[in-house]
Image: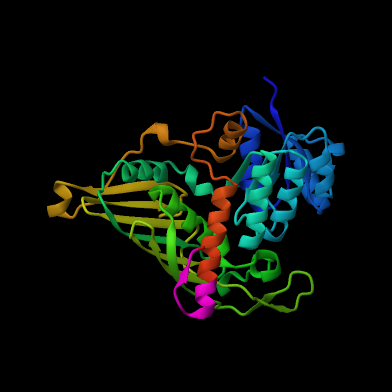
Amino acid sequence: MKKIRVGSIGIGGISRGVHLPGIAKSPDLEVAAVCDIRPEALEFAQRAYGVKKECCFEKYEDLICCPEVDAVDISTPNCFHFEMAMAAVKAGKPYAVEKPMTMDPAQAEKLAAATREAGVKSMVCFSYRYKSAARYMRDLIRKGTLGRIYHIDMEYYQAWGLPLFGTPKVWRFDKAQAASGALGDLGSHGLDLVRFVTGHGYTRVTGHTGTFTDARPDPVTGGMSTVDVDDFSNAMAEMDDGTAVTFRITRFAYGRGNYQMMEVYGEKGALIYTLDENGQGQDSLRVCLEPLGRDNQQFETVRVPGRYRADQMQSFADLLLGRGDGLTADVGDGLRNMRDVDAVLRSAASGSWQRVE
């Protein structure tokens, strides 16, 4: 069967680490074209994935219009997501876009409406929906294993923002390119993951954000440049079923690589999902269930059945081929996530609880 030819825009870290390898690994996809403003990035794609020189573009419009591109993959700074996804929609081509989907809810609403009207398939890359432990947790919660859920605590910790690493002012520290800092970069994943495992949305939130390092070296000028996004974000949320949720998000967690932990406490048991707990990138699930858990307070690591394994870019292929499992985030999920992020930002600015629109 003919492979789906993917054109990938933005050949940065997330593209080289996840998107391009995932496309190349899939039996249903191939890297047909790439786009980046840096010659080095285009040369990398030619060398690593055999992309033809005539299918290496500096302008994303040229890639989207290329007749050798069936689907579009967007891995650029956040400020470009909206215009590139809209261009794919206008060309009638399905797209996968990194999170956060857009810069604000207004853009997200326009993109969602245009995507639905055009009948174009979409995927928003909430990567942790594909962790087998998270999917197993989702099944246990939705089957009622824990009974009513009372509390969820979600942490997402990285360390690369700490001064000791000397990280320069890359685009993630620039509001004009990122819209928000740790909240949009990491917190959007956390907000989506809690929605994903519970099946419930947020009704109101209260947020606290802050910046620890106000200026960083500019990689172009060598001088110091102001940081105008959050280094951390704390939030409390109420879900539509009454569940109380807390979020703790930071780039200043010493000793952490890409660490996540979600604790879920219900009337009949508790679950703890972790990712990268010991720096090995592994995900795991611990359980404490009736009847033994009530008395011994023991959490046991369980084996996650193989049927919960999934791959992000293969899931994109399955979506396009009409055989998806229904667990991939689409433009509607991206819109809901943008409203969640926006509510936290509004709360942090106002100092008060905010309704999620």
Identify which residue is drawn at 48% across, 54% down: 192
**Percent x, y of residue 216:** 66, 75
Q: How is the image coloured?
A: rainbow
Q: Nearer the viewer, residue 141 or 74?
A: 141
Q: From the top left corner, tell me how far across and down residue 241 is, in percent.
A: 34, 56
- Displayed quadrant of residue 225: bottom right
Percent coordinates x, y for residue 298 in the rendering: 20, 52
- Depth check, front residue: 149 or 129: 149
Q: Where residue 344 sits: x, y (%)?
A: 50, 69
**Which is more toward the observer, 35 or 41?**
35
Residue 174 appears in the picture as rendered: no
In the drawing, does residue 2 fall left or right of residue 237?
right
Depicted 217 relative to depicted 159: above or below: below
Q: Residue at x 63, y 51 (%)?
A: 98
The answer to whether any part of residue 95 appears in the image is yes
Instruction: Report the residue at 67% width, 39% height from top.
Output: 120
Residue at the outermost right position: 54
Magenta stretch encompasses residue 109: no
Q: Is residue 351 magenta?
A: yes
The answer to whether residue 60 is above or below residue 33 is below
In the rendered view, tell whether residue 166 sits above or below residue 263: below
Magenta residues, as a range? 346-356
